[in-house]
């Protein structure tokens, strides 16, 4: 099995299924924390999809986009956690 076939028939379907399952958690999540974690996980899975596509198409430019998206997702998660922590103090 070639690397391209492995990407197409194993990795991308697994990532797609995981995005669908996380979307269910995003909509069903009983608390705000569950939804924040689901959003962070969706972004992380999106970074994985971008990385697989970048390797598959041999476009190194997309890896820079994935790194920037990871930094933005990290900062967003930190901001949400700070907001939730401040809400608990009140």
Image (cartoon, grey):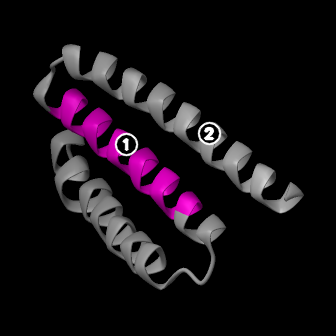
Q: Seen in the image, is 18 located left or right of residue 37?
A: left
Q: Secondary structure at mark 1?
A: helix
Q: Which residue is mark 1?
A: 48
Q: Furthest-right residue in view? A: 89
Task: Kindly indicate the quadrant of the structure image that contains residue 54.
Answer: top left
Relative to residue 59, is residue 66 depicted above or below?
A: below
The label number, if any, that marks residue 79 in the structure image? 2
Q: Quadrant of residue 10?
A: bottom left
Magenta residue span: 36-56
Q: Does the stretch in magenta take in 47?
A: yes
First-in-chain label (2 vs 1): 1
Please, which residue is most extreme toward the front here? 90
Of labels 2 and 1, the one closer to you:
2
List x then y, in percent, for residue 36.
Answer: 56, 59
Whole-percent x, y for residue 67 in the image: 41, 22
Q: Is residue 7 or residue 17 the one in the foreground?
A: 17
Is residue 90 shown left or right of residue 76? right
Q: Is residue 75 magenta?
A: no
- Residue, x 71% and y 55% (percent of image)? 84
Secondary structure beneath disc 2? helix
Q: How many marks?
A: 2
Q: CA distance from mark 2 to mark 1?
A: 23 Å
Quadrant in which residue 57 is drawn = top left
Around disc 2, counting alpha carbons within 10 Å, would you say few (fewer than 14), some (14 to 19), or many (20 or more)? few
Q: Residues within 10 Å of mark 1 (few under 14, many from 20)?
A: some
**Direction from residue 58 to residue 23 in the image, left or right:** right
The residue lying toward the viewer, choosing from 19 and 1, is 19
In the depicted structure, whether residue 15 falls above or below residue 80 = below
Q: Position of residue 25 (x, y in %)?
A: 48, 77
């Amino acid at each position: 099995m070639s690397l391209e076939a492995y990407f197409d028939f194993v990795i991308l379907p697994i990532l797609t299924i995981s995005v669908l399952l996380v979307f269910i958690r995003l909509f069903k999540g009983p608390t705000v924390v569950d939804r924040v974690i689901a959003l962070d996980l969706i972004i992380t899975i999106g970074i994985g999809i971008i990385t697989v596509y970048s390797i598959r198409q041999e476009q190194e430019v997309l890896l820079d986009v994935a790194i920037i998206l990871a930094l933005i997702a990290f900062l967003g998660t930190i901001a949400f956690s700070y907001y939730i922590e401040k809400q608990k103090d009140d």
